[in-house]
Image (cartoon, rainbow, N blue to C red):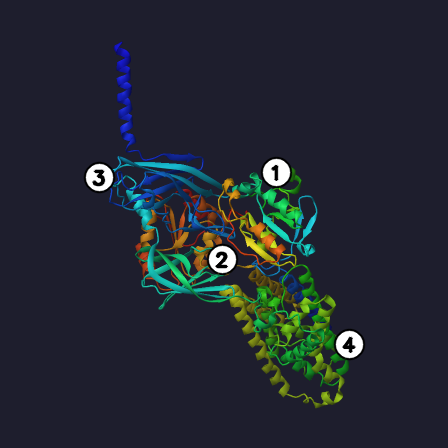
Amino acid sequence: MKRPLNNFLLTLTLAFVLAAPMAHAEGNTHESDLGEARLIADVSAVTPGEPFWLAVHIKPKPGWHTYWVNPGDSGISATVKWLETTPGTEDAIGPIHWPAPERLITGDLVNYGYKGEVYFPIPVNALEFDETPASLTFSAKVDWLLCKDICVPETATLTLTLPTGKAEASKQSAVIHGWVNRVPTSSDLKGEYRVEGNDVAMKMMLPADNITSVEFYPIDDGIIANNAMVETHLTDTGLELTASRGNISPVDPLHAVLSINTRDGVMHVATEFALKSNIQPAVAAPVEPVEKDALPVPTLGLATALLFAFFGGLILNVMPCVLPILSLKALSLTRKGASPRADAFAYTTGVLVTFATIAGLMIALQTAGSAVGWGFQLQSPGFVTALIYLLFTMGLGLSGVYTLPSMFSGAGDSLTHKGGAAGSFFTGAFAVIVATPCTAPFMAPAVGFALTQPPLNALLIFLALGLGMALPFLLIGIIPALARALPKPGAWMETFKQFLAFPMYLTAVWLLWVLVKQAGPAGVAIALLGCVLIAFAIWLWKFSSPWMRFSKWTLLVLLALALGFSVSIQSGQLSCASPIEMLEEGINSEYYAADRLAELRTKGTPVFVNATADWCITCQFNERIALDTSDVKHAFREKGVTVMIADWTDQDDAISEYLKRFERRGVPLYVLYPPQGDPIVLPQILTPKIVLDALQKI
Amino acid sequence: MEKVHQHSHKFFLSALIIAIIGLFLAQPAGAVSVGEAAPDFTGAAIDGSTVKLSELKGKMVVLEWTNPGCPFVVKHYKSGNMQALQEELTAKGVVWISINSSAEGKEGHFTADKAGEVLTEWHKGHPTAYVLDPSGEIGHLYGAKTTPHMFVIDAEGKLAYMGAIDDKDTADPEDVKTARNYVRDAVSALIEGRPVEPSATRSYGCSVKY
């Protein structure tokens, strides 16, 4: 009889013993194959009247990430919906305070989020009760999206019960406060921004003057394209950011977060940019001096368009691109044995045929669906580069570096009738190609109109253009009086020819300026390199007699290389600083900062420091041969290495200090920090094998 | 000497012209805007036919970027929401083109012969055509970022709406019942001659698996 009572008492005691820790329970942990989540607090007990922090802790499996308040191009941010809380507490609970994110890049898409574990702090204001309950319960439905290469939405009901009493820091207090520090602070810093066509320019005054870099994260999404580089410039007047437009209309103000890296650490600041001006593009404008007129004008009648085109063509003759060719060709008519009429007709035919070809091409492209406008060729960096080469080559000829082919030379050639005509044809064709950079004001509306017309009308307009351009030469050929009025050949022609080289060079310079905007400084460097190759090829050409065949082939190979360069410019990316390029590969990459290195080391993150400079050839060599290879990049990714780029291109005391640590006075310096232990210094000339072997060891 | 010159210059000119033609045939990257002509494209549908946008002038067209593996697409398909919308709009004369831009090896990719095995049961939608775009060309042309990502094109071929399918950016199928469907609203506005409001929203979903 006593037994059952003993059992009962035992059970009851056990129940109480077990129940007691429940009052101090931390809350449930949600587990799935992709990770864990739980609701925690920075106090182990809540004292009424004192605010505290709750936090949603999400710990995904390695390789998975979740999102910021603005997830970016895709993804969803986490949501917390309070289901049940102790009565009287609901109003005191604030929203998620989002810690500053990282950039997550997958191909063309850029997201903002957190690469691994994240703690979302939630503030709870001071609670007041008439009658303080023994414990407080917080229960929320939390939804978050975990993505790696696929996405899996997770949901859980997370509950936390805390006793009331004297508040003491909980075990998670330190880590929660660490994440609270990562939440951007509101500041009085406000900036302004302008939208001009495809560019967004943001400005802000920044007090700190030891800033090394700034990261920009928009909270209002879509106004700025997430996947375009945001260039940051630190000037005396503060910070300037240049970005590209997204496809959502600009808002006023634009809310954003700036993560400001200084030599003393990093600051996260929540700020806003007031909209100062908003100039939307009228149409996707080609890179052209006469942009705004490039809209098609449907009200232009065909006859008017033909007239405009004709006059436009006429004006082309005085443009610096065309004038040299025309002048020389006109003067060639004054030679003995020249047949002005045939030449003039051949030239006109050349011009008309080339214009017709271009017209045909534009019409074909249009029907294939591309949006083309006059000058569309100039939107292509490859074409611009090819034009630069052409102008440079012709300029060299005019300057006398080599003998211009018969179609250009004016003095002293005895040409056959036939040779003259064919030469004139090609002169006409060349003139048209070279004329494209110098499109005249009259042409734009006419051509724009042409493209809205049925193909036959469009062709007629282009032919009118050609006729206008060919007219002066045609007249000289047909009207003997005009030909006679031309100055007689003489020594002055050589000087004149050399003078005409300069408009060619000027046009090439203008095109180089265009190329800067299209392909960046790297593109221009490549184009100039191509020009050097061409000049070299021309020099080789001079040694033609015994090795004619050889030098011809070399010439062709060099030309092919030059053209190949121009194609690579066409398909190349904008030149960006190396950390951005590496970010695109999914490798965590930053600029060197001493304290950040220390921080990463304490976290046990492997770090690879690459001390380099733009002017250091060995560095560039190592980067191309060893560091930029897919195997090495893959290894960096695999091992979770953070690459720190110490860019010593301009003087930098912090980097000089770092180099001194390893008893070096210059770059390159490659140091690999394993998660634990001493750093490994790699040799100054790298091979992929050296880097991979070192990475294997960590 | 002259003849040789002429030859090499003819060659050079032809080479230059060919190179120039080649160079600017490269398609520029997509940055479409509401109110502008929707870029033309040609796509291969799973039934073997070819779909060309310019041939659809005179009809309203809806482009729906999709990926059967994406939870946000599943949200609209499993609930029947997408199919109902497709049926409703195609009955009104809209041409609905579902486009799958998943690259080979990535989530959601399949070849036309396997379509029957992948698009089973509620995965099967009711579009006018389901186009496979594994090279991502059409996706990049339109700047499609997520699945789903919706584009509504009016009968004149101009883009009238682009962005999210509705205003509840969650993966919860329950939300389709209470969400405001931007695509349905856009098409109704076009039919009734009203302005489309909103004309551009931030799309939500998984990233397109280029």
Q: Which residue is mark 2?
A: A225
Type of amino acid at the residue the image marks with label 4: Lys
Within-10-Å neighbours for mark 1: few <14, some 14–19, many 20+: some
Q: CA distance from mark 3 to mark 4?
A: 107 Å
Residues at marks 3 and 4, common chain?
A: yes
Q: Is residue B128 visible?
A: yes
Provide the chain ID for the residue under circle 4: A
In this view, A427 is above or below A615: below
Type of amino acid at the residue the image marks with label 1: Val
* Nearer-N-terminus badge (2/3): 3
B72 or A329: nearer the eye? B72
Q: Which residue is mark 3?
A: A166
Determine whether, in the image, residue A460 is placed left or right of residue A322: right
Q: CA distance from mark 4 to mark 2?
A: 58 Å
**Quadrant of the image for the C terminus of chain A?**
top left
Question: Which type of secondary structure does the marked residue at label 3 adopt?
Answer: loop
Q: Which residue is mark 1?
A: B118
Question: Which type of secondary structure does the marked residue at label 4 adopt?
Answer: helix
Q: Which mark is residue A418?
A: 4
- x and y percentages locating residue A646 in the rendered image: 38, 57
Type of amino acid at the residue the image marks with label 2: Ala
